[in-house]
């Protein structure tokens, strides 16, 4: 057997103090690596859409002769593709009898201090058109409604005798109305 060319390394036996020193050094390396992390890769968080405006906070352009108005129906949907939903409201004046004409209004959030939480940005149906709304819905960015009306001034306001299915879609910065066929007897 040949003697070792390396001196006796009796002091290389691991003792608890050696393990403690090694663990401390490794912890320091981990902490240092954590502090030297690169910044984010440039990805930004997607904006969180705002909730749809509350129709009860809007001022509608209705003339009710001093009486109150009623929000008969409401629906929400992203009509203009900006990722934030709008509220569409069917509103009419309260009436003791008969069928009061309705308006259909598109609402978005108010802007600036002192403005209402919801504001009217478009009127799809004016109450002056003497229409009542039924079958109202919003799907895939399209507003759909069945408008009930009258064939002549002699028809009692309680009993509309004409029906028309219509849609509105946001296109080119405005709501474009489409009609599905001719008005029909209700």
Image (cartoon, helix red, strand yellow):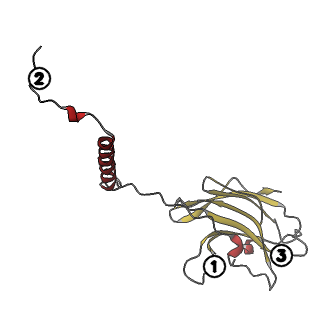
Task: Work out which residue is located at the far right of the displayed protein and give it.
Answer: 97
Q: Can residue 124 be seen in this view?
A: no
Front position in the image: 171 or 32? 32
| Residue 2 drawn above or below residue 166 | above
In the figure, residue 174 lies in which quadrant? bottom right
User: What residue did someone put label 1 on?
Assistant: 116
Q: Is residue 177 left or right of residue 186?
A: left
The Cα atoms of the two marked residues, 3 and 2, are separated by 108 Å
Residue 92: x and y in percent read 78, 73
Front position in the image: 54 or 177? 54
Q: Is residue 54 left or right of residue 19?
A: right
Residue at horizontal 72 percent and vertical 73 percent from the top: 56
> In which quadrant of the rendered image does the N terminus lie?
top left
Q: Which mark is residue 94?
A: 3
Secondary structure, mark 3, is loop
Residue 93: x and y in percent read 80, 76
User: What residue did someone put label 2 on?
Assistant: 4
Neighbours of disc 1 within 10 Å: few (<14), some (14-19), many (20+): some
Q: Can residue 62 be seen in this view?
A: yes
Secondary structure, mark 2, is loop
* Mark with earlier residue (1, 3): 3
Task: Work out which residue is located at the far bottom of the displayed protein and give it.
Answer: 66
In the figure, residue 90 lies in which quadrant? bottom right
């Amino acid at each position: 057997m040949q003697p070792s060319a390396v001196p006796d390394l009796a002091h290389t036996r691991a003792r608890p103090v050696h393990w403690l020193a090694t663990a401390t050094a490794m912890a320091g390396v981990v902490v240092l690596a954590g502090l030297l992390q690169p910044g984010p890769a440039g990805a930004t968080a997607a904006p969180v859409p705002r909730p749809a405006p509350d129709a009860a906070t809007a001022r509608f352009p209705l003339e009710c002769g001093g009486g109150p108005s009623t929000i008969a129906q409401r629906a929400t949907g992203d009509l203009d593709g900006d990722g934030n939903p709008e509220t569409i409201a069917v509103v009419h004046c309260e009436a003791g009898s008969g069928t009061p004409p309705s308006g259909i209004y598109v609402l978005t959030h108010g802007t600036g201090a002192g403005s209402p939480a919801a504001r009217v940005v478009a009127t799809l149906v004016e109450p002056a058109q003497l229409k009542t709304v039924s079958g109202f819905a919003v799907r895939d960015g399209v507003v759909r409604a069945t408008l009930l009306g009258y064939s002549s001034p002699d028809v009692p306001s309680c009993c509309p005798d004409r029906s028309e299915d219509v849609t509105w879609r946001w296109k080119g910065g405005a709501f474009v109305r489409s009609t599905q066929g001719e008005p029909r007897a209700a």
